[in-house]
Every structure is written in C-alpha cells, then in structure tokens.
Image (spheres, rainbow, N blue to C red):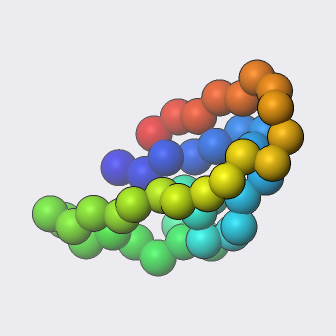
Amino acid sequence: TTVHWHGIELANGEDGTPFTQNMIPPGGSFIYKFTVTRPGTFWYHS
C-alpha cells in the first residue's frame, strides 16, 4: 500500500506512484517526510 497525495507539493520520490517512487517490498515500510509549504485543503488515498 502506498499513499498518493493530491494538491500537496512534494518531491517525486514522495508521491506514492510506482513511476516516481521505488516499490516497497512485502513486509517493508517507508516513512514519508515532507514539509507543507502552503496551507489549504488537500486529500490523499492509498
């Protein structure tokens, strides 16, 4: 499972799509770290 964000400005490696982020192996994990630069209403899905 990954997280895919909408509206938040992130580096490509934090976007959650298989085209811009390496796959997370079964049993693996990934910690998303980013700073929100603009206030607003955003959404995500996994």
Which residue is at the far left? 27
Disc tally is: 0
User: Residue shown at 43%/51% (left/top)?
Assistant: 2
Rendering coords of residue 15 (x, y %) = 62, 58
| Quadrant location, the C terminus | top left
Which residue is at the far top? 41
User: Residue shown at 57%/46% (left/top)?
Assistant: 4
User: Residue shown at 53%/59% (left/top)?
Assistant: 33
Rendering coords of residue 30 (x, y %) = 36, 64
Rendering coords of residue 22 (x, y %) = 47, 76
- Residue 13 falls in image quadrant: bottom right
Query: Taking the image as drawn, is residue 17 in sight?
Result: no
User: Compared with residue 22, is residue 1 higher up or lower down, i.e. above or below?
Assistant: above
Nearest to the observer: residue 15 or residue 18? 15
- Residue 31 falls in image quadrant: bottom left
User: Compared with residue 26, is residue 1 higher up or lower down, i.e. above or below?
Assistant: above
Q: Is residue 40 left or right of residue 13?
A: right
Q: Is residue 39 left or right of residue 17?
A: right
Nearest to the observer: residue 33 or residue 14? 33
Rendering coords of residue 19 (x, y %) = 61, 71
User: Residue shown at 54%/71% (left/top)?
Assistant: 21
Which residue is at the far bottom? 22
Query: Taking the image as drawn, is residue 7 in sight?
Result: yes
